[in-house]
Amino acid sequence: MASSTAAIFGTTAASDSCSRRVFVTTTFQVRALHSYPSFLRTSRAFNTYAPCNNSSVINGGAAALVTESSAKVIDGKATAKEIREEIAAEISKMKESSGVVPGLAVILVGERKDSATYVRNKKKSCESVGIKSYEVNLAEDSSEQEVLKHISCFNDDPAVNGILVQLPLPSHMNEQNILNAVCIEKDVDGFSPLNIGRLAMRDREPLFVPCTPKGCIELLHRYGVPIKGKRAVVIGRSNIVGMPAALLLQREDATVTVVHSRTKNPEEITREADIVISAVGQPNMVRGSWIKPGAVVIDVGINPVEDTSCSRGYRLVGDVYYEEASKIASAITPVPGGVGPMTIAMLLSNTLTAAKRAYNLE
Ligand code: NAP
């Protein structure tokens, strides 16, 4: 996957200048509950998960404590909804007091259906919280110059606070050139080297934190999972997920090990972790035997696997073998319904931050 948020908004060609259309059993579980008291207060923690269905996490409060697994489900879908509501309330107040409406622009090149779906979802989410969305849809054979021209227009437009270029771009375009053209103050995806550099340095603050890793940490915070002094393993080191997730955990004083495709004994290393974040893209790679009893598992992976019992012929699974890991971990995110919805919520959050900054409303 080439981009987190940029990979998760849609369609029609605009060639004229600046046009817009614009995630029970035994003794360790009891220990885990004591370690993470906020689970006891969080009805979302008592959920069940059924595959094949986006609404697989059933919000039924404590009465729904019917699960073969011991782990609490870290419900990204419900948490993302909560965050969207918070953002909507803030935007509504902002609009009332200062007339400011945050704006997010998305540039989509080509006609990939998945990209169009991502763009549509982002657009819907923007609307739901009161962010104005702007869209440019360019044909597959558009030139790099055309994309750059639209980025330049959005850079100059004060109504636009965040800019996303939907990835992947057609192969004839230089992705780095294009992403570098987005001005840093509007880089709500947080992928610019300056943002990542600041994230990596002590006593520096990035303007924006990349949305998917930010969503992982937000889930840990909202579920009261302590990070400071804990051992964390991040599996995967991509620029958009693994690497920034490791930097974020380190900023929160975890001791972090990064596992990648050349790592020897990944299972042994991962089994030492109190917190595991997996962003690999390999279905069910992380088995139950990789997980330390009581660890917290955040599964970023979104992997389609063939399943003829599903109407669409496939279902989505994570990197983590959920049925095994959920019997050993103290808490785990499901796929779907875990990190995915958090990514979009964090994009909205970054856009709101950008608008507040632009209008000195922080
Ligand atoms: P990526 O760019 O392909 O990176 C995969 C990483 O996993 C690489 O660092 C690679 O190591 C490592 N890796 C691959 N095989 C491995 C193995 N057998 N053992 C250990 N490490 C291995 O992928 P990505 O963009 O980070 O995405 C990863 C997954 O997260 C995908 O399933 C993607 O769909 C999902 N995703 C979800 C969201 C969301 O919103 N939930 C957002 C973005 C991505 P090397 O560096 O050595 O090659």
Image (cartoon, grey):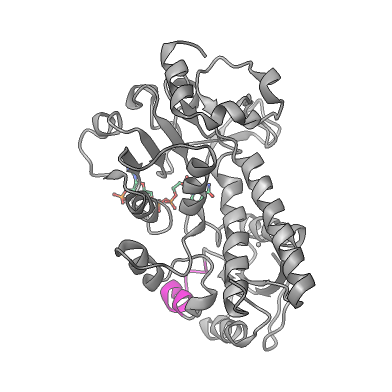
Taking the view exactly as shown, the residue that stands out farthest to the right is 96
Residue 51, compared with residue 178, is above or below; it is above
For residue 268, which quarter of the picture?
A: top left
For residue 72, which quarter of the picture?
A: top right
Please name whichever residue, 228 or 119, is drawn nearer the observer in this view of the structure: 228
Q: On the picture, is 295 further left or further right than 220?
A: left
Whether residue 259 can be seen here: no
Q: Residue at x 49, y 43 (%)?
A: 221
Residue 362, compared with residue 63, is above or below; it is below
Return the x and y of residue 305 as percentages of the image width and height: 54, 34
Return the x and y of residue 281 as percentages of the image width and height: 44, 43
Q: Residue at x 50, y 23 (%)?
A: 71
- The C terminus is located in which quarter? bottom right
Please name whichever residue, 85 or 70, is drawn nearer the observer in this view of the structure: 85
Q: How many marks?
A: 0
Return the x and y of residue 203 as percentages of the image width and height: 32, 66
Residue 112, compared with residue 160, is above or below; it is above
Taking the view exactly as shown, the residue that stands out farthest to the top is 26
Residue 323, compared with residue 219, is above or below; it is above
Is residue 20 highlighted in magenta?
Answer: no
For residue 312, which quarter of the picture?
A: top right
Q: Residue at x 32, y 38 (%)?
A: 230
Is residue 176 highlighted in magenta?
Answer: yes
Q: Residue at x 51, y 65 (%)?
A: 189
Whether residue 267 can be seen here: yes
What's the magenta region? Answer: 169-180
Return the x and y of residue 65 as percentages of the image width and height: 63, 18
Please name whichever residue, 53 or 46, is drawn nearer the observer in this view of the structure: 46
